Amino acid sequence: MGLTIYLDSSGNKKLYEQIYEHIVEEIRAGKLLYEEKLPSTRSLAESLGISRATVDYAYSQLLAEGYIESRPCSGYYVCKVEDLLKIEKRTGEKEIPDLQPRNGMEVQIDYNPNSIDMTLFPFETWRKITRNTISDDRLELFASGNPMGDENLRRTIAEYLYGARGMETDADHIIVGAGNDYLLLLLRYVLGPDRLVAMEDPTYKRAKEIFSSMNYRIETIDMDKQGMRTDFLSDYKTNLVYVMPSHQYPTGTVLPIGRRMELLSWAADGDRYIIEDDYDSEFRYKGKPIPALYSSDKNDRVIYIGTFSKSIAPSIRVSFMVLPDKLLRVFKNECSFLSCTVSRLDQAILNEFIRDGYYERYVNKMKKHYRAKHELMISQLKTWGANFQVSGENAGLHLLLTSKTGLTGEQMEEKAAKMNIKIYALSRYVSDERLLKKDFFRNTVMLGFGALSEGQIRAGLKMLRICLN
């Protein structure tokens, strides 16, 4: 089919964004239907008189968000999102198992998927803000504060979420806490004791352990290449879903728009809520950031949790949660006796770091820095040949490497440990052993690159290639 797109070349908006937005609007309006084929990138570029790379960029974003799919040797087709209008009209860091080298020697290279690079952190700026904050003799910073966190920081976070994640909220809906773990525990008071929570499988095991400690019953839901099987939710009496839609941990999957709408439609009925863990949305290397699920919620059913531990430093231990109106009222009635678990001094420092633009500049620098490592990892791994497959690209601080020869993730761990290299089997994050019958979950390892230098990445992959072949 042909597409009639009128592009504005004034420079107010990038051309690829205009193409992306036009196609999204056509799909949402029902003008582009399920299974309808889109023009090839070459033909669309020729008809618009622009570079093919621009169209490629737009299509990549549409693919990432699940509006279209690519079929080998066939082309691009519209995904099944015909219920979108009907639905819309209805109103940390992650931790890993601690593995020790099998030969007792010190690990030389650790592909920890949760480690970050602190070499470029603006320590002098942080020290300056800290000195200025303390020297101002602000006595209120040493007094007891609001249990939700200081209003100035919450207001700054709300502004950041609007600009970076497309979320419309305000300071009164945000709660600041010392890490995601604390905020999940806090939800026990807000959501009440009787909850059956559905989680992706594989998933972030710390969250699962926390829900278990709260005496919440847990059902694990199978995943496929598009993320959580939302159609399976009807098989259970679950009333709470914990999900990582923008970059699932540990698989790196992005929940497409169709399944997001199915999930929101599920939550619209009864006393149901969705916990959106948005732990590393800052680090996406191709296209625009994936929109937060919260920004599509028309029924006030999404509990959004974000953190600065991944983007700034693990020791910052500052996370935040955005509560729907109903749950906010419960928090104010039931949790007003609690104290905020982040010191007011730390909140003041972080507030100035974000408010004055230092945070945005630092994240942009780190995104460029991590992108170079990400591209190096992919370029090196793709030379390994047909015996291995790379997945989980374009975002985050780790990649997935799958053996096509039957070598399991745990066997790859053992082989790597003999060379004092630490890698992480995906199987350790799987709850239902049925999944381990599938090659992907059984034969895959996670390779983090955040804290490694380019030299370490090259050297480590060279040794891994030898020991895994």
Image (cartoon, rainbow, N blue to C red):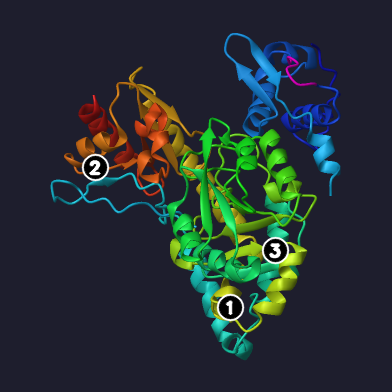
Q: Residue at x 53, y 62 (%)?
A: 180
- SS label for mark 1: loop
Q: Earlier in the sequence, mark 2 or mark 3?
A: 3
**311 versus 414 height, above or below:** below
Q: Residues within 10 Å of mark 1 (few under 14, many from 20)?
A: some
Relative side of 455 to 300, left or right: left
Query: Is label 2 in contact with label 1 (beta carbons under 8 Å)?
Result: no
Gap in angstroms between the C-alphas marked 2 and 1? 40 Å
Q: Residue at x 47, y 46 (%)?
A: 203
Mark 3 and mark 1 lie on one chain; the one further toward the N terminus is 3
Task: Give the spatial CA distance, label 3 vs label 1.
Answer: 16 Å
Which of the numbered marks, if any, corresponds to residue 323? 3
Indicate the quadrant containing the C terminus: top left, top right, bottom left or bottom right: top left
State the residue position of label 1: 340
Residue located at (86% from left, 43% from top): 89
Q: Amino acid at mark 3?
A: Leu
Q: Are marks 3 and 1 in contact (CB under 8 Å)?
A: no
Residue 217 x, y percent position in the rendering: 52, 56
Other-residue count near label 2 (Cα within 10 Å), few / some / many at <14 / 14–19 / ≥20: many
Magenta segment: 33-38
Distance between the alpha carbons at the discs numbered 2 and 3: 42 Å
Residue where numbered disc 2 is placed: 421
Residue 222: where, in percent of width, then height?
52, 37
Q: Disc 1 marks which amino acid?
A: Cys
Q: Looking at numbered disc 2 in the image, what kind of residue is underneath it?
A: Ile
Instruction: Tell me the element at label 3.
Output: loop
Could you say where residue 299 lies in the image, as x and y percent from the top left?
A: 79, 52
Q: Nearer the viewer, residue 232 or 57?
A: 232
Mark toward the start of the polypeptide (2 vs 1): 1
Of badges 2 and 1, nearer the viewer stands: 1
